[in-house]
Image (cartoon, rainbow, N blue to C red):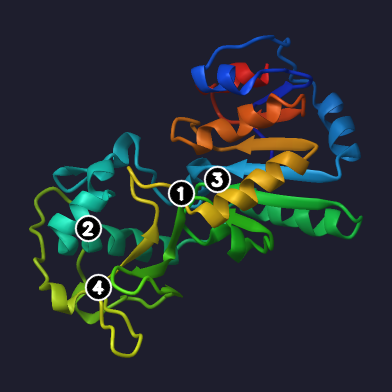
Amino acid sequence: TMLLQNRAVFALGLRMSSTHVTRGSLMDTARPNSDMSEFRKVFSKAKHIAIITGAGVSTESGVPTFRGENEKWRKWQSQDLATPEAFSRNPSRVWEFYHYRRELALSKKPSAAHLAIAECEARLRKQGRSVVVITQCIDDLHRQAGSKHVLKVHGSLMETRCVSCGNVTVNKRSPICAALKDTGAPDPDVADAQIPVDKLPRCDESDCHGLLRPNVVFFGETLDSHILTKVEKEMEICDLCLVVGTSSIVYPAAMFGPQIASRGIPVAEFNTQTTPKTEYFT
């Protein structure tokens, strides 16, 4: 429990039907409970713990989010660059944006939250208990911290996917290609590098040489069905859920916690402030 420093809203026994979860209505409401002794009691008995993490855990490492003061990159809204349409229209600009994010993430170290979560998993594994991290973060900091069982629902900055052959490869090269070196500065007065498409990251598969894209889920795309199937399985078997450092406004991940709570499973939210989904855990 040492990773949980700011605020805990603890829920036990909440029941909701899936239709009510989708609409955001509550069939029943439990009273807020921030009693850490009760949380520790439930935590000590849990055998399968799901920890849902968001950008807040990486913000502590110095990785900016899409929102707040980092909502813009140069003149553009970050969310407008992270779309398949933007990549098709201007792959050079989008690659500059992701090159900036990759280089930033590669320079950061795991936060206290990352380390505590990894330590929790290692300690419980020795007791025959399991911990799975279901993260919306696209950096590699959970794995760097030592977490073994990580499901990345929004993909990874450190992977590429070929738009031609579909091959996915781990790629931590810095820079990812020569043409992107010293590009990607976020300042509004910086001009686009306008890199020719044949100089952008290309597939290494023989006879392909297709354009690579970051293996992340752009806004408007569906989540990887294989990852989603694994997430659903973990949500079905977990007997305790922690929601850590997420604003709970990006779907479908925002509904993972409420879906678990709808089974009557305890859900504890740890954030610096309430979120649109806090009511489901109270």
Q: Which residue is labeled 4 in the image?
A: 211
In primary-sequence order, the first of circles 1 and 2 is 2
Q: CA distance from mark 1 to mark 2?
A: 20 Å
Left or right of residue 266: residue 73: left
Badge 3 marks a residue whose secondary structure is: helix
Is the N terminus in the top left, top right, bottom left or bottom right quadrant? top right
- In the displayed structure, 184 sits above or below 43; it is below
Residue count near mark 2 (Cα–Cα under 10 Å), binned few <14, some 14–19, many ≥20? many
Kind of residue sitting beneath label 1: Leu
Label 4 with label 1: CB-CB less than 8 Å: no
Q: Which residue is labeled 3 in the image?
A: 57
Label 2 with label 3: CB-CB less than 8 Å: no
Q: CA distance from mark 2 to mark 4?
A: 13 Å
Badge 4 marks a residue whose secondary structure is: loop
Badge 1 marks a residue whose secondary structure is: loop
Left or right of residue 209: residue 3: right
Q: Which residue is labeled 2 in the image?
A: 94
Q: Residue at x 18, y 62 (%)?
A: 91
Label 2 with label 4: CB-CB less than 8 Å: no
Q: Residue at x 22, y 62 (%)?
A: 96
Q: CA distance from mark 3 to mark 4?
A: 32 Å
Mark 3 vs mark 4: in front: 4
Kind of residue sitting beneath label 4: Leu
What count of labels does the image hold? 4
In primary-sequence order, the first of circles 2 and 3 is 3
Q: Which residue is labeled 1 in the image?
A: 223
Residue count near mark 3 (Cα–Cα under 10 Å), binned few <14, some 14–19, many ≥20? many
Residue in front for this viewpoint, 111 or 131: 131
Residue count near mark 4 (Cα–Cα under 10 Å), binned few <14, some 14–19, many ≥20? many
Q: Residue at x 55, y 31 (%)?
A: 255
Is the C terminus in the top left, top right, bottom left or bottom right quadrant? top right
In primary-sequence order, the first of circles 2 and 4 is 2
